[in-house]
Image (spheres, grey):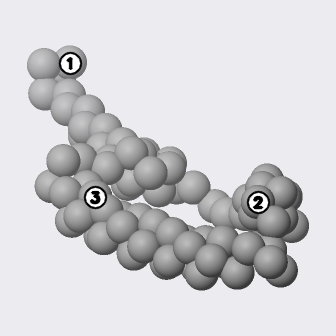
Amino acid sequence: MLNNLTLKIDSYPSRKAMGFYNLADRAGDIAQQGKKAAAEAVRFYASTGDKLADFKNYKLSDLGSEIMYTEERELRIIYKPGPNIDFKA
């Protein structure tokens, strides 16, 4: 009777909800994040260059204060699913 027991635990849905993806899922996300990061860097350096070019009205210390102090805050509270458990006797 105990020989025919099967237990299958699939924790992938709960791992995926926490951001732990497998390699196939993650490959496309990494490429998108790279493109997004490159675009943000280009935008930042271009705007910084424009600001610093106006050296009579814009100081280097102004740039430092803009970069160091930001008011952005975010708090997320969301449900994370547990693993799928399949037990057959």
The amino acid marked with disc number 3 is Ile
- Residue corresponding to mark 1: 2
Which is in the foreground here, disc 2 or disc 3? 2
Local crowd size for mark 1, using a 10 Å CA cut-off: few (<14), some (14–19), many (≥20): few
- Residue corresponding to mark 2: 60
Quadrant of the image for the C terminus? top left
Residue nearer the viewer, 80 or 35: 35
Residue 51 image offset from top left, x and y in percent: 67, 78
The amino acid marked with disc number 1 is Leu
Q: Are marks 3 and 1 in contact (CB under 8 Å)?
A: no
Disc with the residue nearer the chain's start (1 vs 2): 1
Residue 25 image offset from top left, x and y in percent: 22, 59
Residue nearer the viewer, 3 or 18: 18
The residue positioned 76% from the left and 60% from the top of the image is: 60
Local crowd size for mark 3, using a 10 Å CA cut-off: few (<14), some (14–19), many (≥20): few
Disc with the residue nearer the chain's start (2 vs 3): 3
In the image, is 67 to the left or to the right of 71? Answer: left
| Real-space Cα separation, disc 2 to disc 3, in angstroms | 34 Å
- Residue corresponding to mark 3: 30
| Real-space Cα separation, disc 3 to disc 1, in angstroms | 45 Å
**Which element is circle 2 on?**
helix
Residue nearer the viewer, 59 or 85: 59
The amino acid marked with disc number 2 is Leu
Residue nearer the viewer, 37 or 67: 67
Quadrant hosting residue 34: bottom left
Residue 21: which disc?
none
The residue positioned 28% from the left and 58% from the top of the image is: 30
